[in-house]
Image: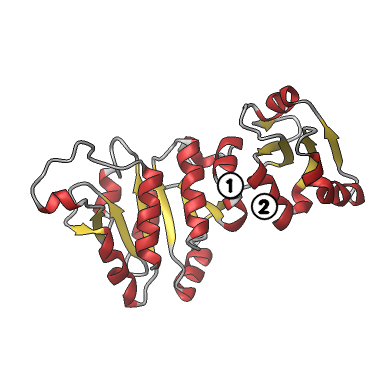
């Protein structure tokens, strides 16, 4: 939940606030917690006292109002609303030079899925995530921050005006891999695609419609996550995974 007057974002959830405390305590301007979790944030309160920050014990109902959710887990930290970095050629050139992989989200939208993808990317050491400016997910929310379980502190979120133009600019520089139900190559082949010395850009699409047609046309490869029954000609009752679940499998295959 955002406080538009103060330009603040509420970060809630025990793991998310603890990771924030560990990596960027200086970002926290105000801290609120219930009596039950108070002993676990004594160190952070001391840090806030030194930097003249505010911290107070509040009932759970007040934390719900501050965060806009009942899933605050007894703690809410207020930070300045994160700025999403506009992606430019200097940044992508550094990825290419250092062979850093990246993820492009094409019409994902759902905040919980966005947070879960960030969590998986952080776990597998993929630190570059790109989102188009014209999508609802471009705003890092309290929900996505909480679902990421601290993963937001380990990734960089970039924005682009056009996914298609980005893909065109990266042609021949990164291996552009889209997910598609009609693909012939499987996720297991990601390790082969990434063995040629170029970094990989994985494009994840909307759960209902997948990646857009223009994005698909600008991919070097299309892949699918298969199941064993496909080899035997069996019909799958569910034709696709949740995008966040799929991302975990793809990141594993890419990094193993």
Where's the N terminus, which quadrant?
top right
- Of residue 208 and residue 74, the one placed in the foreground of this image is 74
- Mark 1 falls on what kind of element? loop
Residue 34 appears anywhere in the view = yes
Q: Circle 1 sits on which residue?
A: 149
| N-terminal label among 2 and 1 | 2
- Of residue 114 and residue 238, the one placed in the foreground of this image is 238
Where's the C terminus, which quadrant?
bottom left
Tell whether label 1 touches label 2 (CB within 8 Å).
yes
Q: Position of residue 250 (x, y in %)?
A: 35, 57
User: Is residue 128 shown above or below 69?
Assistant: below
Q: What's the residue at 81%, 49% (across, down)?
A: 44
- Mark 2 falls on what kind of element? helix
Residue density around tag 2, few if under 14, some if 14–19, many if 20 or more, within 10 Å? some
**Residue 14 falls left or right of residue 164:** right
- Of residue 150 and residue 142, the one placed in the foreground of this image is 150
**Residue 153 falls left or right of residue 78:** left
Q: Circle 2 sits on which residue?
A: 19
Residue 82 appears anywhere in the view = no
Q: What's the residue at 54%, 41% (across, down)?
A: 147
- For this orientation, the residue located farthest to the left is 233
Q: What's the residue at 68%, 26% (across, down)?
A: 64
């Amino acid at each position: 939940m955002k406080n538009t007057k103060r330009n603040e974002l509420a970060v809630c959830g025990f793991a998310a606030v603890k990771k924030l405390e560990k990596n960027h305590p200086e970002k926290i301007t105000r801290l609120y917690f219930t009596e039950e979790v108070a002993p676990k944030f004594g160190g952070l309160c001391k840090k806030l006292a030194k930097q003249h920050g505010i911290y107070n014990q509040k009932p759970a109902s007040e934390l719900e109002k501050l965060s806009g959710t009942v899933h605050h887990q007894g703690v809410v930290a207020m930070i300045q609303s994160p700025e999403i970095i506009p992606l430019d050629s200097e940044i992508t050139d550094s990825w290419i030079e250092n062979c850093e992989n990246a993820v492009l989200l094409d019409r994902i939208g759902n905040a919980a899925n966005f947070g879960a993808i960030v969590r998986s990317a952080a776990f597998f050491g993929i630190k570059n995530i790109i989102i188009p400016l014209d999508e609802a997910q471009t705003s890092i929310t309290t929900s996505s921050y909480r679902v990421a379980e601290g993963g937001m502190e380990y990734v960089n979120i970039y924005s682009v005006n056009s996914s298609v133009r980005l893909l065109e600019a990266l042609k021949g520089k990164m291996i552009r891999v889209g997910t598609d139900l009609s693909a012939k190559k499987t996720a297991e082949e990601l390790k082969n695609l990434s063995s040629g010395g170029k970094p990989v850009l994985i494009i994840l699409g909307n759960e209902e419609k997948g990646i857009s047609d223009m994005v698909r046309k600008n991919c070097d490869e299309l892949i699918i996550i298969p199941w064993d029954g496909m080899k035997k000609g069996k019909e799958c009752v569910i034709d696709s995974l949740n995008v966040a679940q799929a991302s975990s499998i793809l990141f594993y295959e890419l990094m193993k």
